[in-house]
Amino acid sequence: QITTKELGTVMRSLGQNPSESELQDMINEVDADNNGTIDFPEFL
């Protein structure tokens, strides 16, 4: 599972600086089961 915190860490390591709201929006776009994280099948 990927949390918003982990997604933010990855994005910042790639030179991006997303807000918490933007990170949550990114997760919400692919979070099919609405558990607040990106699971491996959702990631694919």
Image (tube, grey):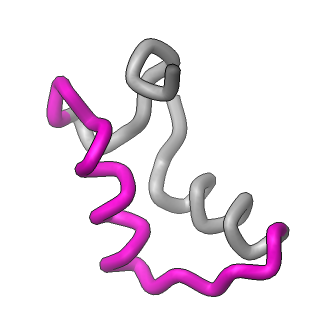
34 relative to 15 in the view: left or right? left
Q: Residue at x 53, y 39 (%)?
A: 2
Q: Residue at x 26, y 48 (%)?
A: 29
Q: Residue furthest top?
A: 41
Q: Residue at x 62, y 53 (%)?
A: 6
Total marks placed: 0
38 relative to 33 in the view: left or right? right
Is 38 a magenta residue? Answer: no
Of 7 and 29, the residue lying toward us: 29
Of 30 and 36, the residue lying toward us: 30
Q: Position of residue 4 (x, y in %)?
A: 46, 57
Q: Is residue 20 above or below residue 43?
A: below
Q: Position of residue 13 (x, y in %)?
A: 83, 69
Q: Position of residue 24 (x, y in %)?
A: 32, 64
Is 24 a magenta residue? Answer: yes
Q: Residue at x 68, y 67 (%)?
A: 11
Magenta residues, start to end: 14-34
Q: Position of residue 17 (x, y in %)?
A: 63, 86
Q: Is residue 34 above or below residue 10?
A: above
Q: Is residue 14 above or below residue 2?
A: below
